[in-house]
Image (tube, rainbow, N blue to C red):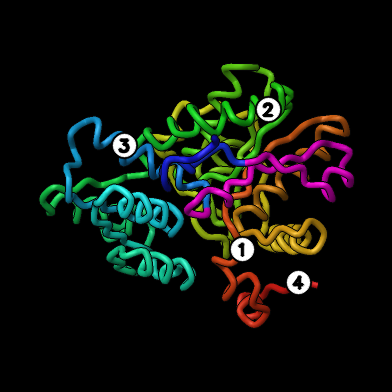
Amino acid sequence: MDIKNGFIGSIGNTPLIRLNSFSEETGCEILGKAEFLNPGGSVKDRAALYIIEDAEKKGLLKPGGTVVEGTAGNTGIGLAHICNAKGYKCLIIIPNTQSQEKIDALTTLGAEVRPVPAVPYKDPNNYVKLSGRIAAELDNAIWANQFDNIANRLAHYETTGPEIWTQTNGRVDAWTAATGTGGTFAGVSMYLKSQNPGVKCVVADPMGSGLYSYVKTGEIKIQGNSITEGIGNSRITANMEGSPIDDAIQIDDTEALRVVYHLLRKDGLLMGGSTGINVAAAVALAKQMGPGHTIVTILCDNGSRYQSRIFNREWLASKGLMVS
């Protein structure tokens, strides 16, 4: 019998899906790790589980305790699910720029949700810094600290990376993904490089993030902005420190949206904006490398979490964007 042990036992071991339309277009095998099929609906379930279980192992989180986090949504959703499964309370500090669907999901899951103004990381009232201060003021509480808690990247080093390696029989030429905390990109990159140093690890970066500039020039410079949520950064997190990076590809919103709608119409996949960035980078990388290569990326979450935004033509028009 193949029976998973509750919500937690269902995390991981997601399928690797061939993106047929883009594979045929480029002559490469473009494969998407279907992280939207995790029980909490996103790649962040993995990090949420490792962060909580790491705190338990260290004796930092005791029965009835509270998990506090500053998150753009998906990590919070994963944490809320796991807190319910383990009997903890969950407090989420979220930028008020995030989709209403994610805020509603967190509330439905029973998390206490505190939307705050979106301000740069250098501001003391940035949602990440604020969540850390709040956690420190509570009894029997931990700050998940997903950006700088390396339990995050360990989740992907121990699970996502090995799964990709096994599912491709070790035939991976390149790996690309956008980074927010850096955990997914770093953990998978470190594992794949440990198996084959020749695997090309490429950061996919939206406009409004400084990581593309960092990879190309060694300095963080930010240009433009993006409607994508939860990815990009203006600093190098602890999870990204020491991560092998071979190159970076910058993707603007127009291209990300084109890819999102293409996946919907041609491949039957309803995906979010970060997946648009990831797959667009995989396609660009395939064209750089030429036919015959295998390129893996992440299908982060389901597009239903962005129904009122990237699948709302009026909202897109308000941002000066459109899809044909």
Residue beneath disc 4: 323
Whether residue 196 appears in magenta in the rendering, the answer is: no
Q: Looking at this view, is 301 or 276 the one in front?
A: 301
- SS type, badge 3: helix
- SS type, badge 2: strand
Residue beneath disc 2: 200
Whichever of callouts 3 and 4 sits on the residue coming sooner in the sequence is 3
Q: Can I make out residue 118 in this image?
A: no
Q: Can I make out residue 105 in this image?
A: yes
Q: Are marks 3 and 4 in contact (CB under 8 Å)?
A: no
Occupied quadrant, residue 124: bottom left
The C terminus, quarter of image: bottom right
Where residue 303 is drawn, which disc sits there? 1
Residue beneath disc 3: 53
Viewer-side label of 2, 1: 1
Span shown in magenta: 15-41
The residue positioned 58% from the left and 52% from the top of the image is 36
Q: Residues within 10 Å of mark 4 (few under 14, many from 20)?
A: some
Counting from the top left corner in percent of width and height, residue 76 is at: 38, 56
Q: Are marks 4 and 1 in contact (CB under 8 Å)?
A: no
CA gap, disc 1 and disc 3 = 29 Å
Whichever of callouts 4 and 2 sits on the residue coming sooner in the sequence is 2
Whether residue 16 appears in magenta in the rendering, the answer is: yes
- Horizontal side of 288 relative to 311 (left or right) equals right
